[in-house]
Image: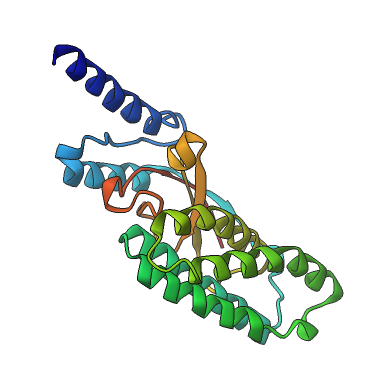
Amino acid sequence: MKITSVAAFAILLFAFASCKNNETKDEHAGHDMDNMGNDTTQHATASADKEVKSVAVLYSNLDVKAAASFKEVVDHYLHVKNALANDNAAEAAIGSKAMEAALVKIDKSILTAEQKQVFDKIEGGLKETSTAIAKSGENIKQQRAQFVMMSEAVYELVKDFGAGRPIYHDHCPMARDNHGAMWISEVREVKNPYFGSAMPACGTVEEVIK
């Protein structure tokens, strides 16, 4: 029993250390599951105190109709992100289905040749991942795996075309079996979509896109 207890403690210590490994970029709160409420509060305070790098959108002169279409896509992504943060697979599927529909409606004829070329490189990944999450039903593990790629595509979309509001780029070092993964958020407070209620505040705010 003593050996088992030591092993369990070692595993918990390793998990805690993993989520602390980006501490040079941002202050991480501990992930002691018995103090999760305090952890969330401490992390939110640390994120609020950190000076976040500001990034300007590439195409600031985007056609109004195109800007509205891209904002709609991002809004549905945020729907998916918040659903996963709340451990709600059914709601994540609904948000992804709505994203599918929004992507189909985008009128690329109103984009400049350069803008269209940029969007074409992003569009395939958005369609593929939104379809996959929409069809995954209640399989939240599968949804989160697809969400990694969806987030990378939406991040590029926001950097290039904006989202009609400031958007935060977040990163979790423990996602994908400690390989790390990013997501974007409409709020500065970290709400982790990869771990949900298990570790809601695990992550750092890397930049804000305006």
Check the image and report above or below for 183 versus 80: above
Q: Residue furthest right?
A: 113
Query: Total label count?
Result: 0
Q: Residue furthest top?
A: 3
For the point 70% across and 69% down, the residue is 123
Picture quarter containing residue 153? bottom right
**In-front residue for pair 77/54:** 77
Position of residue 106 measured from the top left corner of the image (x, y, whole percent): 67, 83
**In-front residue for pair 144/66:** 144
Position of residue 43 measured from the top left corner of the image (x, y, whole percent): 30, 43
For the point 34% across and 24% down, the residue is 14
Q: Quadrant of the N terminus?
A: top left
In this rendering, position of residue 151 left or right of residue 118: left
Position of residue 102 measured from the top left corner of the image (x, y, whole percent): 58, 81
Picture quarter containing residue 138? bottom left
- Does residue 165 show up? no
**In-front residue for pair 32/130:** 130
- Does residue 21 show up? yes
For the point 57% across and 71% down, the residue is 131
Q: How is the image coloured?
A: rainbow
Position of residue 164 measured from the top left corner of the image (x, y, whole percent): 54, 74
In this rendering, position of residue 16 left or right of residue 122: left
Q: Quadrant of the C terminus?
A: bottom right
